[in-house]
Structures are given as C-alpha cells and as structure tokens.
Amino acid sequence: GVIRDGWLHFEVLSRGNDNRRFQGQVQLIESTGVSVISDIDDTMKTTQVHDLQSMLENTFLEEFQPVDDLQSVYRQWAAEGASFHYVSSSPWPLFEPLNEFCQGAGFPRGSYHLRLLRLRDHMLRRLPVIRRRGKGGKIKSILKAFPGRQFILVGDSAERDPEIYGAAARLYPNQVTAIYIRQVNQRPLDTQRAEQAFRGLPRQLWSTFEAAHELPATLLARETAGAL
C-alpha cells in the first residue's frame, strides 16, 4: 500500500483464476486531536426524512443537494487538522452516490459509517423505523476507538440526533466537547425536547443553528468561546 495525505491506499487481488482487483482506502488518524462526527441526511444533504415520499425521492430519484454551505465550515475545520467521520442510517449500497456527492460538494474526505440492510419489498414501508436504529452504536464505537481525541458532533433535529448525541456525551464526557444541532422546521428541537435529550450535560456543551455561518468558523473560535 501507499500512504498519501493521511490515507493508506491498497489493492486486494482475488484468489485462483479470478483476476479481479479491488481498491480501497483507510484513513490513518492520530491518537490525539480533534474529530468531527457528522450526520449526513438533513445535516449535509437535503433528504427530508420527516416525510417518507420526499425522503425516497431525494434518495433515489433526485440529484443530491447540499444543505446551506456547511462544506465551507467543514473544510476550514479540516484545514486546522480535524478528521471527519460521516455517520448515517443510510444503507451501504448508497455509499458510492454519497461519496460522490460529498466529494463533488467539497466536503472533506472522511470515513463512512453506514447501515447494513437486507432490502426486501416490505422494507420501504419500514425505512423510518429502520433509520432510527444503529447510529448510536456506530458513534460509540468511534469514541471508544479513539479515547485520546476530542469530538465535535454535528447533526439535525429531524431525527434523533439530539438524543443520540446527548447519550454519547454522557457516556464519554471527556471526549465530546461540542454538539451542534441544525434546526429542521418540521421537527425543531424545542426547549422540552432539548432538556430531555441533554439532561445532566453542561448547557454550553450544545447549541442549535439554522445556517452554517452560525457555526464557529474555526476550531480556535470554539476554544475562545469556551467549547473545549
């Protein structure tokens, strides 16, 4: 393999008479530093998960569209050394279009953590339920794998990101240093829900935003504001 820009590029050869070759990349991350765990749907790309028909259209029929200008903020954070982990309840068959979208929209390279899913006819009716499962476990696995790193969690209010991120912060209080939740009008993070999702956590740990420019422009700005 070859290491370039913090990534190990490798190739796997099939056995026997199978001449196929498969290429892959592994992100090499230092044991200390800052990582960003980001949701994808309705945080980075418009999906409208609150409405099943819109979600299916935006996932399988329409061209993926970025939300606001979040990629500019992420690029600045990446330029300051942050690593990125993209976590989604979307199934692995969507990896290639999601990766192409992220690259085309200008999001930093990062690892993907998607959902294993066996597609059956009746699964489409259960997608909203299926999407609510598994994301928390992926996030906890990342936090557990890098105990010396500090984490920024970015998500939205349309699904259960506030509840999942709050639970992660309670389990790993020394690692989760900031939580940012994008407000989705159809299911906003109101006071009652926020109090439940972030119970027992310092108020300065989490905040909401509607537009990307409301996020700290730099990691230094976070430190100055007391997020770390």
Image: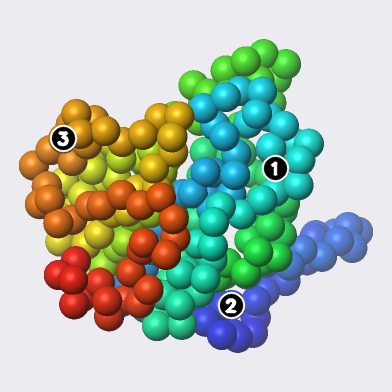
Q: Give residue 156's quadrant in the image.
A: top left
In the rendered structure, which disc, 1 or 2, sits on the residue that comes first in sequence?
2
Query: Which image quarter is the N terminus in?
Result: bottom right
Amino acid of disc 2: Leu
- Disc 3 crowd rating (10 Å Cα; few below 14, some 14-19, many 20+) is few
* Residue closer to the observer: 222 or 130: 222
Q: Secondary structure at mark 2?
A: strand
> What is the three-letter code of the residue carrying label 3?
Glu
Q: Earlier in the sequence, mark 2 or mark 3?
A: 2
Q: How many marks?
A: 3
Do the numbered discs 1 and 2 sit on residues whose CB atoms are within 8 Å?
no
Looking at the picture, which amino acid does disc 1 mark?
Pro
When asked about the image quadrant of residue 132, the answer is top left
Q: Would you identify the image quadrant in which residue 198 lies?
A: top left
Q: Is residue 132 left or right of residue 162?
A: right
Instruction: Give the crowd class for mark 1: few <14, some 14-19, many >=20 residues within 10 Å.
Output: few
Would residue 204 appear left or right of 129 to someone viewing this image? Answer: left
Q: Nearer the viewer, residue 27 or 154?
A: 154
Q: Position of residue 94 (x, y in %)?
A: 68, 44
Position of the C terminus by quadrant: bottom left
Q: Report if residue 114 is visible in the image.
A: no
The Cα–Cα distance between marks 3 and 1, rounded to whole angstroms, is 36 Å
Task: Work out whether residue 214 can be spotted.
Answer: yes
Q: Secondary structure at mark 1?
A: helix
Q: Nearer the viewer, mark 3 or mark 1?
A: 3
The residue positioned 59% from the left and 77% from the top of the image is: 8
Residue where numbered disc 2 is placed: 8
Q: CA distance from mark 1 to mark 2?
A: 23 Å
Query: Residue 93, which numbered label?
Result: 1
Residue 97: where, in percent of width, then height? 72, 51
